[in-house]
Amino acid sequence: MSKQSLSVFFSYSHKDEILRDELAKHLSLLQRDGTISTWHDRKITAGSEWANEIDKNLNTADLILLLISSDFLNSDYCHQVELKRAIKRHDAGEARVIPIILRPCRWQRAWFSKLQLFPKNGEPVTEWKNIDGAFTNIVEGIENAIAEMQKAKTTSVAPVQPPVNVNPVELLSAKGINYRELEKLLKAKEWQKADQETYRLMITAVGRENGDWFREEDLKNYPCDELLAIDRLWVKHSDGLYGFSVQKQIYEECGGKLDFSYPSDETWNRFCDRTAWKSEGKWLDYPDQFFLNKSINVKGHLPYRGRLRRGRGREREEGYFFSRIKTCEV
């Protein structure tokens, strides 16, 4: 089955038009083979209402490229209209936003600073000794993002099938774990109860009691069939909004490595911002703040309770089951 073309929207200042055109040239092969179609406001035809055209293309874009410079940051339209809409669509999981630093400017306090930036290390395009090298690095990042998005679209379109060892009617696993109650809660959108039921099922599967923490060996050796069964139920009944596999994708986008190692503070904070596990740099109280309307619709927000405690007396919660799902999917 051929992969669906993704639409790309350029959000930029007209003073950076030359650099935008250079980036478009480097993306030309992706356009020619039908991987992407690109749009910017210079494509608005005579007689069209430009604001309506921008809104239409911005609201339907799969990938939004923010071309960052001092002029972009200074543009009221870029900030008040395009950036605000891009933020909403990104947070809702409707589109992916990629910031591209064209020229040196103080962008570190902006909302998009939490996202993966290009070129690498956030070095502005104009500061590279070879500008073509900068654009090549940007395109490589865009290609990786496109590959992940196309895979996600294929997964979300295809019906979610239960694993081999799970009876599709009884939802009874090979270990005798019954997922019927979890499916019932997920179908009813009872997210808090479903998160608690997920923990109960998982702690039972590793032979521990309700209220216990997961150990590192539980994380690394958790039965793949059981983990995939739970993940597929979450993905299916949340329409791709929640699930360990969803969290895994976000974690990788944030620079995390799925090798059970501790992430850097920068990577972990970026992931927690994306999944709304933190708000304004502070952990959300579970469950009181965790199931508020403002965070419940954030992609990857749930399930949460699949976590372990490492070290004696340490309260830091690290090590999540999306690390294990990487090996289960292989």
Image (cartoon, grey):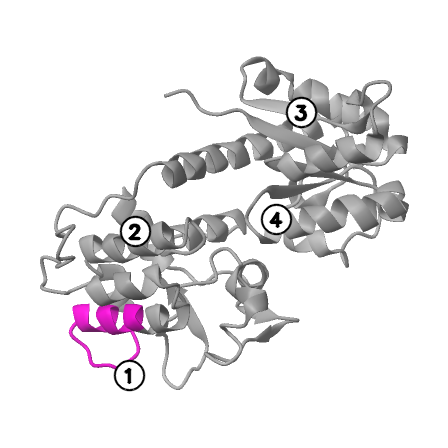
Q: Residue at x 27, y 81 (%)?
A: 212
Q: Are marks 1 and 2 in contact (CB under 8 Å)?
A: no
Mark 1 or mark 3: which comes first in sequence? 3
* Dot 3 amino acid type: Thr
In this rendering, which labeled residue sits more in front, label 1 or label 4?
4
In front of the other: 11 or 120: 11
Q: Quadrant of residue 197?
A: bottom left
* Dot 1 amino acid type: Gly
Residue at which label 2 appears = 232
Question: Helix or strand or loop: what does disc 3 sit on?
Answer: strand
Numbered label attached to residue 38: 3
In the image, 288: left or right of 187? right
Disc 1/disc 4 C-alpha distance (Å): 35 Å
In this rendering, which labeled residue sits more in front, label 1 or label 3?
3
Residue at which label 4 appears = 90
User: In the rendered structure, which segment of residues is drawn in magenta?
Assistant: 197-214
Instruction: Determine crowd level at label 2: few under 14, some 14-19, many 20+ residues with C-alpha closer than 10 A.
Output: many
In front of the other: 310 or 225: 225
